[in-house]
Image (cartoon, helix red, strand yellow):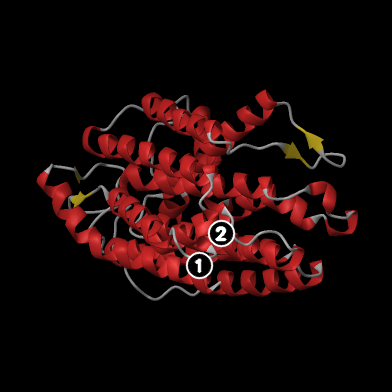
Amino acid sequence: MREYLVTLLLAASICYVVTPYVRNWAIRFGVVAKIRERDVHTTPTPRWGGLAMWIGMAVTYLMVNHLSLVGKSFTRETIGIFLAATFLVLLGMVDDRFELDALTKLAGQALAAGILLIYGVQIFWLPINGVITLPPSIGQLLTIVIVLVTINAVNFIDGLDGLAAGIVAISGAAFFAFAYLLAVIYGFSRAGSPSLITAIIIGVCIGFLPHNAFPARIFMGDSGSMLLGLLLAASAITLTGQIDPNAISAEKLGPTLLPLALPLAVLAIPLIDLFSAIIRRLRAGKSPFASDKEHLHHRIMRSGNTQARTALIMYLWTATIAFPVSISAFTPLWVAAIVFSAMLAFTITFQKKRPELKKVVQV
């Protein structure tokens, strides 16, 4: 645990330090988000935050590679994840500057998923009527779908200062807790790609948030949202590869099922936003990639909340779903239910108790 904490702190510190330099580079090269009708921000703001996150990840990789425990996490899968992430950051940087069309970005995301497949990052089985070993073609297709959905879920939620970075940090924390406890309780290797990647996810998000929280001085852009989405998806997929589902008894199905279910839980809020937006736009006869101002954060703000408070509300909803699901694999269901009920009650109470403030941002 100590080495993973060191990894997290290194990633956070490096990302925090390099972000102002990346901000200056973005301004110099004209990578600045202008004001559009659908946007909430009111001043032009530099992008390329994903580059700062990538630097934090890359330098951390180099610094922790020789640690006794974490160093064992550097497998062929880890190399593939790094290469796919690097490709997506480069694609996102181009998009942040020139605004690529949606199909080009989708093709690039699929190519990044293909890089993962080349390096062995793939879904091999599903817990259906016991355990079903998937044919390679089906496993590869499912892997690509998971990667695409997760990337775009994070991308869709990136609409407020600090929102995506905070939600992904919470999601990463829930996933790290699950992966590490799984190793401790069931004797799996603690030195795995999921623990390393999620520690870095948490670190770069924490390091980036002080620059990205309201009022944001830099946006993560598509370079950041696609990077974080890919890392989350890769963590989930590699975790399934560490588990022998046949070695877990029927009474302990939680650890078998959760590597596949947990991504749905930790990204429940972004996924709800993603699929509701797609359905909403298709019903209106629009492209699913068309923009609008009906995302969850837009609706919460219209009820009278500021940007900062809206982000906090969505943090709470994310934690309310993610953490009880994570602990349900290791505790009786009634314990997880109590935790969920308590967090749900607190979140609803917090959301209802709005301060008597005028709307700061008109949406």
Residue 209 placement: quadrant: bottom left
Residue 360 x, y percent position in the rendering: 29, 64
- Is residue 359 in view? no
The numbered disc on residue 74 is none
Residue 224 x, y percent position in the rendering: 35, 48
Residue 190 placement: quadrant: bottom right
The residue singled out by tag 2 in the image is 195
Does residue 318 appear left or right of residue 293 in this picture? right
Does residue 39 appear left or right of residue 277 in this picture? left
- Above or below, 133 relative to 50: above
The residue singled out by tag 1 in the image is 4
The three-letter code of the residue at mark 2 reads: Ser
Contact check, label 1 and label 2, Cβ < 8 Å: yes
10 Å crowding of disc 1: few (<14), some (14-19), many (20+) = many
Please tell me whether mark 2 sits on a helix, a strand or a loop.
helix
Q: Nearer the viewer, residue 30 or 279?
A: 30
Residue 193 x, y percent position in the rendering: 55, 52
Q: Nearer the viewer, residue 269 or 93?
A: 93
Please tell me whether mark 1 sits on a helix, a strand or a loop.
helix
The three-letter code of the residue at mark 1 reads: Tyr
Residue 96 x, y percent position in the rendering: 26, 39
Q: Which of 266 and 64 is in front in this view?
A: 64
